[in-house]
């Protein structure tokens, strides 16, 4: 197998959740109950078992981690906003799972614990607010509660991280969650993992990492297979 080159990290300040959510998350049409993501070259631009040398430590407010040689590692730019918006849907938050066949599962989990998802932006005060007025105790506590970041590890409902056939990973996710295979959407960068479709899962191949557009295209494909009227779309 030809090794992929690691994608250089962008400015950590760009890794935030102020980007818009995928449009399919808010268009009112059906969504899969569970989104499953591979890790390497899907959520982050490297192979954790070949590019990363422990020990790891957090840097830049946990927006990235650095290894023994000072190399920096983080998510693709859109990933934090995608994960957070999946969980912030008021009525029905989506279940999130990671399914990776890496040969360094402990290192992958450590990285998920070190990489934090930025807090939501503080609410903007109304235009007619008096410049010298003090915030109410409720609004103050609201800003305080939203000011802390969340470990990316903790936003996932299920983790299946170990070497092997991805059908095994997905079968264990189904057993754990009781979600039907037909209600799962799996994002992965390797064509060989399309074999999960034999279980009834919708597979969406990503190239260059998960983006909001790739999530939308994956959801549109899931809807197409479900026969959802008006479920298709045209990427922006």
Image (cartoon, rainbow, N blue to C red):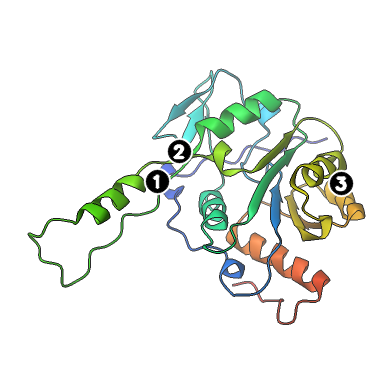
Q: For numbered disc 2, what is the local secondary structure? A: loop
Instruction: Give the farthest residue toward the bottom.
Output: 229
Whole-Å distance between the Cαs marked 2 and 3? 31 Å
**Residue pointed to by mark 2:** 63
Q: Residue at the spot x=62%, y=41% of the render?
A: 45
Question: Is 143 above or below relative to 169?
Answer: below
Q: Which mark is residue 101?
A: none
The residue under label 3 is 192
Q: Position of residue 65 (x, y in %)?
A: 50, 30
As drawn, 120 above or below 220: above
User: At 28% across and 49% down in the image, what residue appears?
Assistant: 141
Residue 155, how many percent across, how many down?
A: 56, 44
Quadrant that contains the C terminus: bottom right
Comes first in the chain, label 1 or label 2: 1
Quarter of the figure with the N terminus: top right
Q: Taking the image as drawn, is residue 14 in sight?
A: yes
User: Which residue is at the front of the view, 3 or 213?
Assistant: 213
Q: Residues within 10 Å of mark 1 (few under 14, many from 20)?
A: few
Report if the CB atoms under discs 1 and 2 are less than 8 Å apart: yes
Of the numbered discs 3 and 1, the one sitting upstream in the chain is: 1
CA distance separating discs 3 and 1: 34 Å
* x, y percent for residue 225: 82, 70
Q: Residues within 10 Å of mark 3 (few under 14, many from 20)?
A: few
Q: Relative to 202, is 8 on the left or the right?
A: left
Q: Is 151 displayed left or right of 220 in the figure?
A: left
Q: Quadrant of residue 180?
A: bottom right
Q: Which residue is mark 1?
A: 13
State which tag comes first along the sequence, 2 or 3: 2
């Amino acid at each position: 197998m030809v090794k992929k080159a690691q994608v250089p990290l962008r400015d950590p300040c760009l890794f935030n959740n102020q980007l818009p959510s995928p449009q399919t998350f808010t268009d009112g049409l059906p969504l899969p109950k569970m989104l499953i993501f591979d890790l390497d070259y899907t959520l982050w631009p490297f192979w954790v078992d070949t590019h990363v040398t422990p020990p790891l430590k957090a840097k830049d407010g946990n927006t990235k981690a650095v290894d023994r040689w000072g190399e920096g590692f983080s998510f693709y730019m859109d990933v934090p906003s995608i994960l957070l918006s999946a969980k912030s849907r008021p009525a029905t938050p989506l279940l999130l799972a990671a399914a990776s066949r890496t040969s360094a599962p402990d290192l992958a989990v450590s990285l998920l614990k070190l990489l934090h998802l930025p807090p939501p932006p503080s609410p903007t005060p109304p235009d007619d607010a008096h410049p010298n007025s003090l915030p109410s105790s409720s609004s103050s506590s609201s800003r305080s509660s939203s000011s802390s970041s969340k470990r990316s590890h903790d936003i996932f409902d299920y983790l299946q991280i170990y070497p092997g056939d991805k059908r095994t990973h997905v079968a264990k996710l189904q057993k754990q969650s009781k979600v039907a295979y037909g209600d799962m959407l799996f994002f992965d960068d390797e064509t060989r993992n399309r074999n999960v479709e034999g279980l009834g899962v919708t597979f969406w191949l990503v190239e260059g990492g998960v983006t909001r557009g790739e999530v939308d295209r994956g959801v549109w494909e899931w809807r197409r297979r479900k026969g959802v009227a008006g479920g298709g779309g045209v990427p922006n």
